[in-house]
Amino acid sequence: MNKKINTLIFIAGATIVNMFIIAILLFLFILIISLVLPDDASPVTVQFLFLGAFLLSLVGSFFIYNRIVRFISKRIDMDKYFHPLFRRRKR
């Protein structure tokens, strides 16, 4: 396989992994909220907590994904296997 196909496969796989991390974190945060929150909580409070759980899962997945990519880039020479997404402009 050439570098462009490797890059496309890596981007597709990384996107799937990132969505999987978001789903796991969102499930965990909603589970924690449902265990901690009393049954007579107001709907507005529940909505804000779910919105906060969603935002926390997005931020958390970004940090976890960033750590994974950093770990992979230390182990593998990315320039050897992947095509650069952005090229420097010639002046």
Image (cartoon, helix red, strand yellow):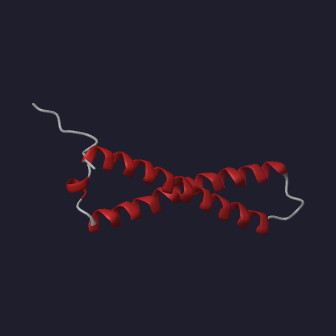
Instruction: Please report the residue visible at 88 percent of the width from the left and 62 percent of the height from the top.
Output: 39
Quadrant for residue 67, please give it.
Answer: bottom left
Which corner quadrant holds the C terminus?
Answer: top left
Q: Position of residue 63 (x, y in %)?
A: 45, 60
Image coords of residue 21 (percent x, y): 54, 59
In the picture, measured across the screen, residue 30 lies left or right of residue 70, that is right
Which of these two is toward me, 75 or 67? 75
Left or right of 14 on screen, residue 46: right
How far across and how far down the image is residue 87, in percent? 21, 39
Out of 31 and 53, give the one closest to the viewer.
31
Q: Is the residue 83 above or below the residue 72 in the image?
A: above
How many dots with numbers? 0
**Furthest residue in direction left, as rendered:** 91
- Specify whether 64 is left or right of 72: right
Q: Who's the residue at 29% across and 62% down the image?
A: 73
Q: Residue at x 66, y 65 (%)?
A: 28
- Toward which corner of the image does residue 38 lie, by quadrant? bottom right
Q: Is residue 91 above or below residue 10?
A: above
